[in-house]
Image: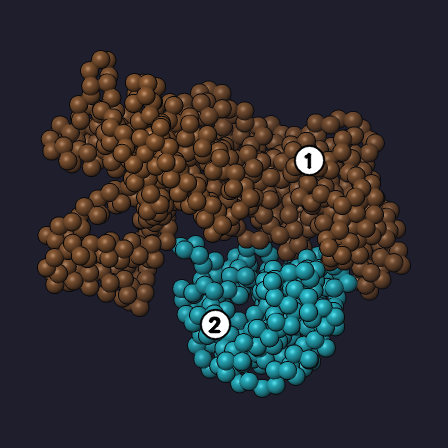
Amino acid sequence: MLAINNLEAGYGKVKVLHGISIQVPKGQVVTLIGSNGAGKTTTMRAVTGMIKPTAGEIKLGTTSIEGFDSYQIARLGLAHSPEGRRVFSTMTVTDNLILGAYPRLTRSRPKGDIKGDLDRALELFPRLKERRDQLAGTLSGGEQQMLAMARAIMLNPEIILLDEPSMGLAPILVDEVFRIIARLKSEGITMLLVEQFAAAALNVADYGYVLENGRITAHGPADKLKNDPAVKAAYLGGSH
Amino acid sequence: MKIKQVLLIAAIVALIGFPLVIDNPYYIHLVETILIYAVLLFGLDIVVGYTGQVSLGHAGLFGIGSYVAGVLFMKLGMPIWVTIPAAITITALFGGLLALPALKVIGPYLAMVTLAFGTIIQILINEMSFLTEGPVGIKIPKPSIFGTVATEDQYYWIVCVLMLLSLLVVHRIMKSHLGRAFEALRDSPVACDCMGVSVYRYKVYAFVISAGFAGLAGCMYAYSEQYISPNTYVIELSILFLLAVIMGGRKSRIGAILGSFIIVMLPKLLDDIVLFRMVAVVLAVLFIILSLVSLSKKLTTVRKVSIPLAGIVGLAAFSFWLENITDWRLTIFGFMILLVVYYLQDGIVGFVRNYYAALTGKSAQAARDAQALLQIKPSGKDVIHAASDTTKGGTLLSVKSVLMQFGGLKALNNVDLTIERGTIHGLIGPNGSGKSTMMNVLTGIYVPTAGDVVYSSNSVVGKTSSEIALSGIARTFQNVQLFGEMTALENILVGLHHTFHSSLLDVSLHLPKYTNEESAARARAMGLLQFVGLESLANEEARNLPYGKQRVLEIARALALDPNLLLLDEPAAGLTAPDIKDLLVIIQKIREHGITIILIEHHMDVVMAACDKVSVLDFGQKIAEGKPAEVQADEKVIEAYLGGQSA
């Protein structure tokens, strides 16, 4: 579904990514793990068009999207649940979700059953359903994270990019977020997941990539990667 | 000698020598006007560029400066060495007045209020005929020096000297702790207050200093024009000043001079069709060369460059089609400003800097900074100061039945907390349970609806954030609140603001008191960066650091405050397992200095490893408290917070 080939990107003259390649096949969950400053967020930004890659290719389905603007990429069916949530804080939960379907409302994506999808998204996140008329800014951090994920789903996307969905969440909510990811996966939604909780991410994912200093240093099926001693030592320490 | 110094000296020599070469008084007067406006723009840049406020009232301040000189001369026959300090002082007072609304309102509202201020000043000058002669205006000769009236050339030199002095003083202020405080309050007012730098006070300072320069400029302007009347100090002039800062480039003295040059010279160049054609052609040629270079180096795309190129070449073509410029003058002036403001958002100086950086792969500033950095020796002494409060044991902070109500929502509902000296106290709970609200109550950002917070036997309720910070409570923020446009080193230096006691005079003259404080602070700041492992990133702008590094930078900045109590709000959020290990080491070292820590965290492994005692909040109420292991086994905590993942 998403193919990244020899991607190079950075800020100004500072190069962060030195030619990385990642494949996300349709219907699979692929995770990208790595330490701070390794380039995970930069990868996400390059894929979503927030920064322009300096070299390499990004293909969504059969379309090359490198150099596209973010809104064009969204119209092609790539939904993004950004790091730090970024919900529209002065709008209600429902309005946030409907905005997620905006390309469908303007017919730049097939319209489908928006009302039905809204109900489905709210079913998926009961906490949001309780608070559907509340302003997004008044939600707690965990609820905002759910809203960002639900908003991404509303695009009826080909693929969802999840950037640090568990960041700043209480342990009980971390579990819930991963349960939701697993559920989305079982519904056949393709996802690229960036996570600090490498163990949890590898549990839910089919395939994993390890990013170090802007290069892919290891990749393989998630259960294999999970038992790789080097990966274990570097990323799977701690209780999660 | 470095090229920069040679250039600077050459520029000063050219400036001083100008009247000796050109003896046309018209041109001398033009350059004089540029210099006078530049002084005002140095000041305006403090408010606009550094503190990020908008002022449309500076023409009014400029007018006050002029009229102080005019009235003092007309009524009392005062000489220039009296009128200059008087103009600076009185205008600075009015600047303080203008700062008051800036403390309440921001953005477009502030623009409106300052605009009203400028208008009122102009109307007052017009109406108060008993003092100002009203619309008739005041005539004032060139100042007398040593008994003789200064010639046009001599006055030009006086202006030159005053401009250069202003340049030096502004530059020094902006590079000092004062300049850093101004920038800090722009980037994050909340963090600024929590670093003990009162946003309230420094906003007023910025306006006062800025107004002082406007007053000086106004005073020089009165002598330069030899006639002042109310209709000079109109709103259009304020807008022109603001444009000059934006076009020249914020946070830059060269930018101010360039901006001043543009607003004075451009209208003159547009007076004459032949001159205008020349200017238009030169600009077009320059731009074509620039575009070709950029395209060949792949710095830009044809698509991006085509519209401004078409605009500027079109302007050149248009200039030859025109037969008479008078009707078109203002339209063209507006069009050119539009091009600059739209395409060069960092101003001309900012554009040149960025372009140079893109072209050579390194920024000149970065190279210079790296050089300067090598000269800072990190302080060898212990960079974390031990808690000043050396009492052992006992209660450092007690929260007594605090209620924090937002509308109908009780974010904190009768919470009691007791923090023992020298311990690490964990605060956990579901998202939205009131942990961050508690932090904000402790640091004075919120005033609790009821209850009391007692820190070292003093109540902190009702104190401002900066007072609380200076009394020894430092914090980090859940949503990182660094000063984004400042470097990592400068961020720490803002935290060290409390170590500076230099006055404006010490800073302007670089007296030993200031230079010693500055070098000590820099050494300590480098030491603190080293402590958290960021010394190699000292010159990186904070906003460009990866998230995890931003979090540890916040800890280092908080330590710079020499706290007794450190509040860490989710320090491990967004960190990977190895980073978390480093973080634990940092926390342990901080504790060894006797600093008490309150730790909000969701990573249970961090809480378990670090904390002596843990309190659990849920829906604004404390539901459990005790040793980490006890809390972890508590049924209520598992149900509300930990879920199945309590291992």
Foreground residue, B7 or B69?
A: B69
| Quadrant in the rendering for residue B524 | top right
Left or right of B109? Residue A193 is right
Q: Which of label 2 and label 1 is nearer to you?
A: 1
Residue B331 to residue B38: above or below: below
| Chain B tint as drawn | brown
- Label 1: state its secondary structure: loop
Residue found at x 60% / y 75%: A98
Residue B20 visible in image: yes
Which residue is under mark 1? Answer: B463
> Looking at the picture, how far across and down is residue B275, in whole percent?
13, 50
Residue found at x 76% / y 31%: B458
Left or right of B639? Residue B540 is left
Residue B99 to residue A68: above or below: above
> Looking at the picture, how far across and down is residue B346, in whole percent?
37, 50
Foreground residue, B518 or B203?
A: B203
| Quadrant in the rendering for residue B423 | top right
> Looking at the picture, how far across and down is residue B568, in whole percent?
69, 45
Foreground residue, A5 or A114?
A: A114
Q: Amino acid at mark 2?
A: Tyr
